[in-house]
């Protein structure tokens, strides 16, 4: 006999139960608690149908996923202001596309590459340490050359971004060039381009906070 999948709601289960009940000795058990009726039949007690919302609603607050606490996939796009979620009382923002946390207001001074590394390593934002100079691909993830800001001659960053003090200049990344470690990659937020410079050159620093795999992290303790 060839089994077929029914497209009618409930038909598949009803057919399955019908086949089971047709077999010798097969009966349906009723929901109930035997201690309530010792020596007798169970009293039928239909189990409540819980939705996903009902289930999540009853979880303890600490166990519920907040925005930016779910691992990002790096392929999903969030429009404008929905992309960034404030953390550390607004001193930083989490990017929901990447799970990276960025300081709201980067320092305005310039550094050579080593100075930029040290600046972020000792940086304290929102009463929290643990910041670092971002890798090239992390920093470049903030570039949006299709934004209205960029096409209008402004910064090539997402429209509706919450950041302050971001300059139309080049920012250091922690990534050095392969084969020539005396050069490192920078991201220019005026042109939206990625370029290289000698480690002794000048650039700005925009610090990030993330785990070692650039992935998501639980931000509940940061709020």
Image: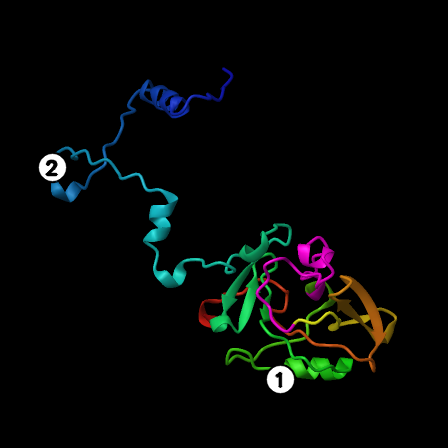
Q: Are marks 1 and 2 in contact (CB under 8 Å)?
A: no
Mark 1: few, some, or many residues within 10 Å (few <14, many ≥20)? few
Q: Nearer the viewer, residue 105 or 155?
A: 155
Q: Position of residue 104 (x, y in %)?
A: 58, 71
Q: Is 221 inside the magenta-drawn segment?
A: no
Q: Which residues are magenta?
A: 139-165
**Tag 1, which secondary structure?**
loop
Tell me if 105 is positioned left or right of 134 in this view: left
Residue 71 visible? The answer is: no
Q: Nearer the viewer, residue 48 or 16?
A: 48
Q: Position of residue 140 (x, y in %)?
A: 72, 63
Q: Nearer the viewer, mark 1 or mark 2?
A: 1
**Residue 154 on the magenta segment:** yes
On residue 122, the disc is 1
Name the residue at the front extreme: 152
Q: Point out the residue furthest to the top here.
A: 1
Magenta span: chief secondary structure: loop
Q: Which mark is residue 39?
A: 2
Residue visible at 55% across and 71% down in the picture = 92
Q: Residues within 10 Å of mark 2 (few under 14, many from 20)?
A: few
Residue 219 vs residue 171, the one in the foreground: 171
């Amino acid at each position: 006999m060839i089994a077929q999948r029914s497209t009618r709601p409930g038909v598949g289960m009803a057919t399955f139960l019908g086949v089971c009940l047709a077999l010798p000795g097969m009966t349906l058990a009723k929901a109930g608690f035997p201690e309530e009726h010792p020596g007798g039949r169970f009293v039928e007690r239909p189990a409540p149908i819980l939705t996903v919302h009902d289930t999540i609603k009853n979880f303890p607050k600490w166990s519920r996923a907040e925005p930016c606490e779910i691992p990002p996939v790096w392929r999903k796009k969030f429009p404008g202001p929905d992309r960034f979620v404030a953390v550390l009382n607004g001193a930083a923002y989490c990017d929901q596309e990447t799970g990276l946390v960025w300081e709201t207001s980067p320092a305005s001074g310039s550094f050579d590459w080593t100075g930029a590394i040290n600046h972020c390593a000792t940086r304290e934002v929102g009463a929290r340490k643990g910041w670092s100079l971002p890798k090239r691909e992390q920093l470049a993830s903030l570039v949006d050359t299709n934004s209205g800001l960029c096409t209008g001659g402004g910064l090539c960053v997402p429209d509706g971004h919450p950041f302050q003090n971001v300059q139309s200049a080049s920012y250091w990344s922690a990534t050095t060039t392969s084969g020539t470690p005396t050069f490192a990659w920078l991201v220019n937020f005026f042109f939206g381009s990625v370029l290289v410079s000698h480690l002794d050159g000048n650039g700005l620093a925009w610090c990030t906070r993330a785990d070692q795999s650039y992935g998501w992290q639980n931000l509940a303790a940061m709020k």
